[in-house]
Amino acid sequence: MAALETLERGDFAKMPGGIFSRSFVRAYALEIGLDPDPVVEEFVAEVRKLEQEAAARRAVRPEVTADDREFLARQRRALRILRLSALGVITIVLVTLAVQVPRWLGRNEAANAAGASATTTAPQPAGESGAGAFAPPPVTSAAPVPTEPRLSVLIETTGDCWIQAVADGKVVVSRLFKAGDRESLKAEKELLLDVGNAGMVQWTINGKRGKAIGRPGVNTRVRVTPDNVAEFVQTSEETGTSR
């Protein structure tokens, strides 16, 4: 009875396989007056179709195991770390370029300015203006005539202090001074002084006593040019008061 109910429901997957199922179908067809051969062939074709569909349903992707998931997680973490590392390297390179490029440009400009100030222009020969009696006498000496710099500064220290001096774009002094140290500085266009513990420094500019650069323990920066020398030189009244 169970086989007959299964056959009538069309639930062929629960029927016994092989020749037993075909025997049941043949007996059933004879019992109800049908030609058994076509019925058995139709049954076999239907069973084969159902088996193919079942095999297709079972052909799914392999199950992802816990090891597989852990491997994928490690891969994702490694990729994130790699991206962060690359971003860090790029950031460091950009910051380094942003800091160093202005320094390089400043050094090149300072070197160019120093080279330009050191270059002297050769005197051009005077042209003939007519009568030979009015022509200037020829120059007999080829030696250049030395000229005094427009800025001449003498620094004396009464205590420990750090001094950096830049003359016409070139660093000429950068060191720690002790009490009693002296340094002579010369420049044509400008002299930049960066002084730590400025109260320990006394100076003269072009032979004249200079004003106090700053107070003890204070870092002071000054820029001296031929045009603003008077701002840093003591007046006669100040000199008399200091005495």
Image (cartoon, rainbow, N blue to C red):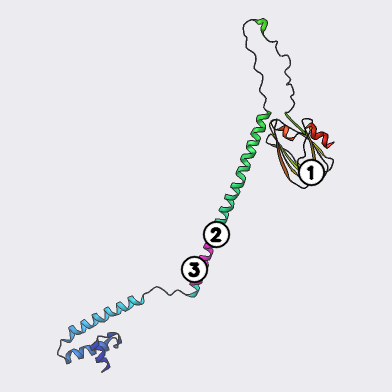
Q: Position of residue 8 (x, y in %)?
A: 23, 88
Vertical order, 197 against 120 (above or below): below
Is disc 2 placed on a helix, strand or loop?
helix
Q: Is residue 85 left or right of residue 192?
A: left
Is disc 1 placed on a helix, strand or loop?
helix
Amino acid type shown at disc 2: Leu
10 Å crowding of disc 1: few (<14), some (14-19), many (20+): many
Q: Residue at x 81, y 45 (%)?
A: 160
Q: Position of residue 126 (x, y in %)?
A: 64, 13
Q: Which residue is mark 2?
A: 84
Is disc 3 placed on a helix, strand or loop?
helix
Q: Position of residue 184 (x, y in %)?
A: 78, 34
Q: Nearer the viewer, mark 1 or mark 2?
A: 1
Q: Which residue is mark 3?
A: 72
Q: Residue at x 79, y 45 (%)?
A: 161
Measure the C-alpha gap from mark 1 to mark 2.
Answer: 50 Å
Q: Which residue is mark 1?
A: 199
Q: Residue at x 62, y 45 (%)?
A: 100
Q: Nearer the viewer, mark 3 or mark 2?
A: 2
Residue 18 image label? none
Q: Is residue 9 left or right of residue 128?
A: left
Amino acid type shown at disc 1: Gly
Q: Nearer the viewer, mark 3 or mark 1?
A: 1
- Marks 2 and 1: in contact by CB < 8 Å? no
Q: Position of residue 242 (x, y in %)?
A: 83, 37
| Residue 71 part of the magenta-drawn span | yes
15 or 218: nearer the viewer: 218
Say whether disc 1 or disc 2 marks the residue closer to the N-terminus.
2
Write down the quadrant of residue 135 in the picture: top right
| Residue 92 part of the magenta-drawn span | no
* Range shown magenta: 69-85
